[in-house]
Amino acid sequence: MSSKIIITPGQCRGARAVLEWSQEQLATEAGVNRMTIADFEQGKRSPLRNNLVMIRQAFEQQGITFIDENGGPPGLREPRSEVKPSPKAESPSEAAADDAAKTKSPSAATRRRAR
C-alpha cells in the first residue's frame, strides 16, 4: 500500500469551500457518512483509504485539481470556468466626451462653407 497522501483535511475543507458544499453534500456526493467527513476535517481520525479516494474523486469530478506536496504545502486549484469578459462599460468622462462631440458647435471650416 502506498504511503502517498490522497487528500489532506485542509484540502478537503478548501475544496468544499470553493464548491460551496456542506459536509452533508460532500458525504452524499462521495458516498460516505457525514461523520467521516467531519472527523477527518477536524483531524479526529483518518478515514479508510477507499473513503479518501471517494472523497477526492467527488471533488475531481467537479473540476478541483489537487496539488501534492512538492517542496511546499499541499493545495488545490479551483475548476476552470468559462468566464466571458463583460462588455467594457463607458466611464462617465468617456460618455460626457462623446456627448460633447455630438453637440459640439460647427467647426470653423463648416461655418466658412455656410457663408
Image: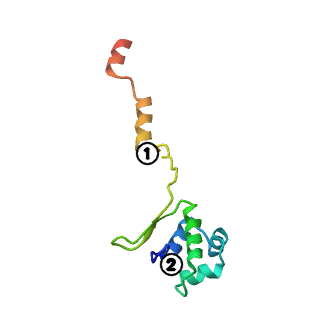
Q: Are marks 2 and 1 in contact (CB under 8 Å)?
A: no
N-terminal label among 2 and 1: 2
Q: Which mark is residue 30?
A: none
Q: How is the image coloured?
A: rainbow
Q: Percent position (x, y) of residue 80?
A: 49, 55
Q: Position of residue 65 (x, y in %)?
A: 48, 63
Residue 115 visible in rendering: no
How far apart are the two marked residues, 2 and 1, measured between alpha carbons? 46 Å
Specify the label residue 91 is tagged with: 1
Residue 29 horizontal side relative to residue 19, left or right: right
Residue for point 52% across, 50% down: 82
SS at mark 2 in the image: helix
Between label 2 and label 1, give the one nearer the viewer. Answer: 2
Q: From the viewer's perspective, is residue 112 above or below residue 104?
A: above
Give me the residue at 40% from left, 37% from top. 97
Residue 29 location in percent, x, y?
A: 65, 68
Q: Is residue 84 above or below residue 104?
A: below
Q: Quadrant of the C terminus?
A: top left
Label 2: how many residues lie within 10 Å, few (<14), some (14-19) or many (20+)? Answer: some
Mark 1, secondary structure of its residue:
loop
Let me know if residue 69 appears in the view.
yes
Foreground pick, 103 / 72: 72
Q: What kind of residue is marked 2?
A: Pro
Q: Residue at x 50, y 46 (%)?
A: 86
List the residue tagged with mark 2. Answer: 9
**Residue 104 in the image, given as x and y percentages of width and height:** 40, 29
